[in-house]
Image: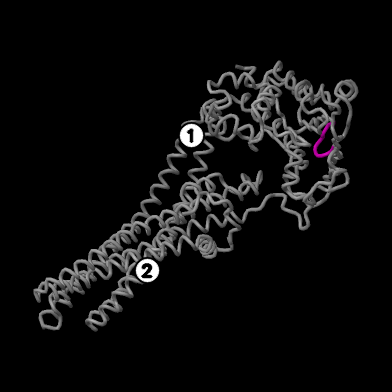
Amino acid sequence: MRSLPVPDPGEADAASPARFLWWMARGQTSTLFGGMAFGVLWMSAQALMPALIGRAIDHGVARQDLGGLLRTVCLVLVLGIVQAVSGVMRHRFAITNWLIAAYRTVQLTVRHVVHVGGALPRRVAVGEVVTIASSDMSQIGHVMDVIPRFTGSLVAFAVVSVILLTTSMMLGLVVLIGMPLLMLAGAPLLRPLQRRSGRLRRLTADLSTRASDIVAGLRVLRGVGGEPLFSARYHAESQQVRRAGVRVAQVQSVTDALQVLVPGIFVVIVVWVSARQAASGRLSPGQVVAFYGYASFLTIPLRTVIEFATKLVGAWVSARRICAVLHLEPDAGEPAEPVTALPATLGRADLIDLWSGFRARAGHLTAIVPTDPDAGAHQADRLGLHTPAPDDAVRLGDLPLNRLSRNVLRRHILVSDTAALLFAGDLAQVLDVRGRASENDLREALRVAGALDILDGLPEGLAGRVAERGRTFSGGQRQRLVLARAVLADPPVLVLVEPTSAVDAHTEARIAQRLRQRRQGLTTIVITTSPLLLEVADEVALLDGDRITVVGRHAGLLDTHAGYRAVVTRSVGDPDEGDEAAR
């Protein structure tokens, strides 16, 4: 059995749902064929059992041949053991196939989400990704689980058909013609099932997005009294999901009923035909019993075929949504001929944006003061190439950033903005995403970010649990932990967007001094209007709209530039100083 998750899920063929499912199947051929082999053996053993029982009746009981009866009983025992062992192995392979498909689906999605990066929230709703991890992976797993049983059912059907044809031509034809016709009885239900399942999948994703938004903004909703409104919206959307689920269940219930009704009709027909042939003397009592056993057994392949069809529909719907996510591309794609290693001469080069006129000198702390906060955030995205950049305006020395491999670029330039989130997990894991830092490194990063008090407040220390999005922390605490994570990464170029907007003035002053000391000799860019951070900057640039209009030191610009002074003093006079100060 394979270890999970797989080391590399591969490169998916997401051109269409059919090609994606075929690619998934080809990626686990060994376990699928193993499951098929045991599925065929398991089904075939069951298919041969009625023949042996009929033989025992005709040759052992009717003829009173004790030796023949014992030999047949021994064969039944051996066949039962084969059936039991093959059934266990088939089930083990079935679970393995389900797990491999589910894990690969999640791995593919997570890897691609990381590849898309910051563009993801602008391209797809959160619920789409959540639903893939919570529901679609199961649908893909289910179809991989049922494939071996479906194959075994087809082989078993062929085996029984041959036995029946050699025994009774009429019964053989009833099976060969009747079973396919009965299978087609449920075909008209597949299209409405696919359509309704698709709508349910879409509504479920939308509801997950709504729930995520409510949870993320619950504190604000309580503050503005918006809980009843959003609760009513969630209730209305959840009722839509419920109604869509009922509509799917209506079709599904009919297909489930057909899994019982159709095989039952088939059993009645076969038993009736075999009983008439037995009454006319063309079949022996043992053969009648055997035919009844065949008819009862064939309900299993028939139900498996119907189950395969319904699960294939569910997997098709899920694969279509997965392909849509896998088709997403980051704002800044991989260049045609990427530079995969940064030249040594550019390791400490200036970061330049020719479009805005900004220059960050290597090894210095440079501050950008935006007249518009959105313009500041956009400038940070440009410097980290998180927005589409068809031109080569942003450069590291004389090398355009859009020529760098994305992996090299992300390792060299880190952008940490106000929208950065904390993941769930132990505090040490949340801060040290690469898993390389020592305890002293972690504590030092927390000290620089003024967050040692948060560590002291956790009974388990660095092993303390951080909830999803860090929701158990205040806004200022989350901001300081995000800053500690960025500091711990220690990139050659660090871009920070308003890193201290939610902390009190005393904490901000300590962070400013410690950040400057920690980043000594490395390039640091801080987008802020905070005087405490501006005072420690080597150079300050005023971003008016999308252009740098003046460059200098903070104190000098306060005295000589009215526009700069207006922006900075306006931020000081903001009554919303920060949530920790208010607390």
CA–CA distance between discs 1 and 2? Answer: 44 Å
415 relative to 180, above or below: above
Residue 545 colored magenta?
A: yes
Q: Which percent across, then down, holds residue 17?
A: 52, 62
Question: Going from the N terminus, do you reach mark 1 or mark 2 first?
Answer: 2
Bounds of the magenta span?
541-547
| Dominant secondary structure of the residues highlighted in magenta in the image | strand
Packing grade of label 1 (10 A; few <14, some 14-19, many >=20) is few
- Image quadrant occupied by the C terminus: top right
| Figure label count | 2
Q: Is residue 313 visible?
A: yes
Image point (22%, 82%), residue name:
168
Residue 559 colored magenta?
A: no
Amino acid type shown at disc 1: Leu
Q: Which circle marks residue 229 in the picture? A: 1
Q: Which circle marks residue 201 in the picture? A: none
104 relative to 352, above or below: below
Q: Nearer the viewer, residue 144 or 287?
A: 287
57 relative to 136, above or below: below
Residue 456 position by quadrant: top right
Image point (39%, 47%), residue name:
242
Q: Secondary structure at mark 2?
A: helix
Q: Secondary structure at mark 1?
A: helix
Disc 2 target residue: 187
48 relative to 545, above or below: below
Q: Is residue 426 left or right of residue 185?
A: right
Q: Is residue 370 visible?
A: no
> In this view, which residue lies farthest toward the front?
67
